[in-house]
Image (cartoon, grey):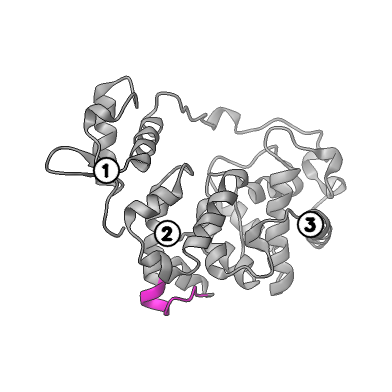
Amino acid sequence: MPTDHAALVDQVTTWYDDVARDLPWRSPDRTAWGVLVSEVMLQQTPVVRVEPVWRTWMSRWPTPADLAAASTADVLRAWDRLGYPRRALRLAECARAIVDRHDGTVPDDETALRALPGIGEYTAAAVRAFAFRRRAVVVDTNVRRVLARVVAGSALPAPSYTVAERTLAEAVAPHDDATAARWAAASMELGALVCTARVPRCAGCPVSTLCAWRAAGHPPDAHADRRRVQAWHGTDRQVRGRVMSVLRGATGPVHRDLLGDVGNDAAQVERCLAGLIEDGLVEQDADGRYALPAGRP
């Protein structure tokens, strides 16, 4: 029996009104810039790590103009250990574009948002929904999982976002701005807190009676053999993170032999240093020392 989309939206948004987490980028005095910053920081990074960094960041750079004037070194130090530090550089580029193109005001038009550096389909839709309370089809991994289970009856969505998923998300999203914005937030919260990937809390789910996956007896993941588990220990990403940590804490340029035990393979360390320089995250001076870039991103 097809899922009643209206009932799904109503039950999930009603549940959300009672249980939504009190996060600073959801507060009544939030700004569109604060929402945009939160969405960039939250990419592949849990809320518990993002919240303290977001608070510090917004206290230091409360507007796009403030961040646009910051140095690369300051931006990367403030990014701290959130990971994927290129996001910090793109965020600074985004701030300058907002200043140059939109007089320092985050635009509410999805096309204009997607034209900003580092802002893709998901982030543009999220900013439109969460900052401006406008209708947008906001689909992250949590929403994909909720729709896969409740509507499609699958344990987990396919490894890559499909046309069928996009069509379904568009069909489920309410047409009016206010309800669509609530649905966007509520469906994400349901996936984050209840309909989790590994151990879903089906007994506490507000839409368990509508769930096609539950009705089918919780069949296993049909795409399990296509999913890759990303390693961490010993990877280039780990070594790059260690290098960035040393340089963030340094008071000046650091010689190669003072970088410490960032990796056991000298060739890997050199490769990672070269990659960091190419990405604009590290500079090397005439004496061969390494440091965070001093100029603007």
Q: Amino acid at mark 2?
A: Leu
Q: CA distance from mark 3 to mark 1?
A: 48 Å
- Please tell me how crowded label 3 is: few (under 14), some (14-19), or many (20+) other residues with Cα within 10 Å: many
- Please tell me how crowded label 2 is: few (under 14), some (14-19), or many (20+) other residues with Cα within 10 Å: many
Residue 91: image tag: 2
Query: Which residue position is annotated with label 1?
Result: 252
- Magenta segment boundaries in residue numbering: 98-107
- Please report the residue visible at 47 percent of the width from the left and 27 percent of the height from the top: 231
Q: Secondary structure at mark 3?
A: helix
Q: Amino acid at mark 3?
A: Tyr
Number of marks in the image? Answer: 3
Point out the tag, 1 or 2, that comes first from the N-terminus.
2
Magenta stretch: includes residue 119: no
Q: CA distance from mark 2 to mark 3?
A: 30 Å
Q: CA distance from mark 1 to mark 2?
A: 25 Å
As drawn, 46 above or below 111:
above
Query: Which residue position is annotated with label 3?
Result: 16
Q: Residue 163 placed where, x, y %?
A: 56, 54
Q: Secondary structure at mark 1?
A: loop
Task: Say which quarter of the image contains residue 284.
Answer: top left
Point out the tag, 3 or 1, that comes first from the N-terminus.
3
- Please report the residue visible at 24 percent of the width from the left and 40 percent of the height from the top: 290
Task: Say which quarter of the image contains residue 214.
Answer: top right
Residue 276: image tag: none
Q: Amino acid at mark 1?
A: Gly
- Comparing labels 2 and 3, the label whose residue is closer to the camera: 2
The one nearer the camera, 94 or 136, is 94
- Comparing labels 1 and 2, the label whose residue is closer to the camera: 1
Q: Residue 102 placed where, x, y %?
A: 42, 78
